[in-house]
Amino acid sequence: VPGDNKDASKAEKSVCPLCKTHLSIGTKDPPNYKTCTECKNIVCTQCGFDAMPTITEIKEWLCLTCQMQRALGASESAGLPAVK
């Protein structure tokens, strides 16, 4: 039955939603992805980063989308003009 192939649906889900890089989910390759601690989306390691690398007590890793939302929220609360 077309469209009933589990491997095909797994392959479709194994791309970064931001840059469309293929993710190594379910392969023997080293992981090239992480889960955003804010939105829980899985993105490639190039589309996210440790938001507080100097604070070891907090294990936070944000995708670029959540980092931008946080940065824009911080600038708005400080009374700075938002970037559009």
Image (tube, grey):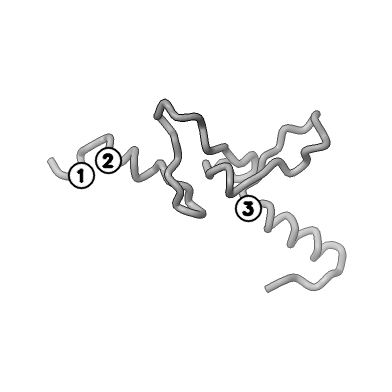
Residue 13 is left or right of residue 44, and the answer is: left
Look at the image and tell me in which quarter the C terminus lies. bottom right
Q: Tell me the residue that label 1 is attached to.
A: 3
In-front residue for pair 25/66: 25
Q: CA distance from mark 3 to mark 2?
A: 27 Å
Indicate whether 84 appears above or below 71: below
Q: Residue furthest front?
A: 29
Q: How many marks?
A: 3
x and y, in percent, of residue 63 in the image: 61, 48
Quick check: marks 3 and 2 in contact, CB under 8 Å?
no
Q: Secondary structure at mark 2?
A: helix
Q: Secondary structure at mark 3?
A: helix
| Residue drawn where x is 52% and y is 37% of the image | 32
Indicate whether 16 appears above or below 84: above
Disc number placed over residue 16 in the picture, else none: none
Looking at marks 1 and 2 on the same chain, the residue that comes earlier in the sequence is marked by: 1
Q: Tell me the residue that label 2 is attached to.
A: 8
| Residue drawn where x is 45% and y is 48% of the image | 21
Q: Quadrant of residue 40?
A: top right
Quick check: marks 1 and 2 in contact, CB under 8 Å?
yes
* Callout 3 amino acid: Leu
In-front residue for pair 64/29: 29
Quick check: marks 3 and 1 in contact, CB under 8 Å?
no
* Callout 1 amino acid: Gly
Mark closer to the observer (3, 1): 3
Q: Tell me the residue that label 3 is attached to.
A: 64
x and y, in percent, of residue 16 in the image: 48, 47
Looking at marks 3 and 1 on the same chain, the residue that comes earlier in the sequence is marked by: 1
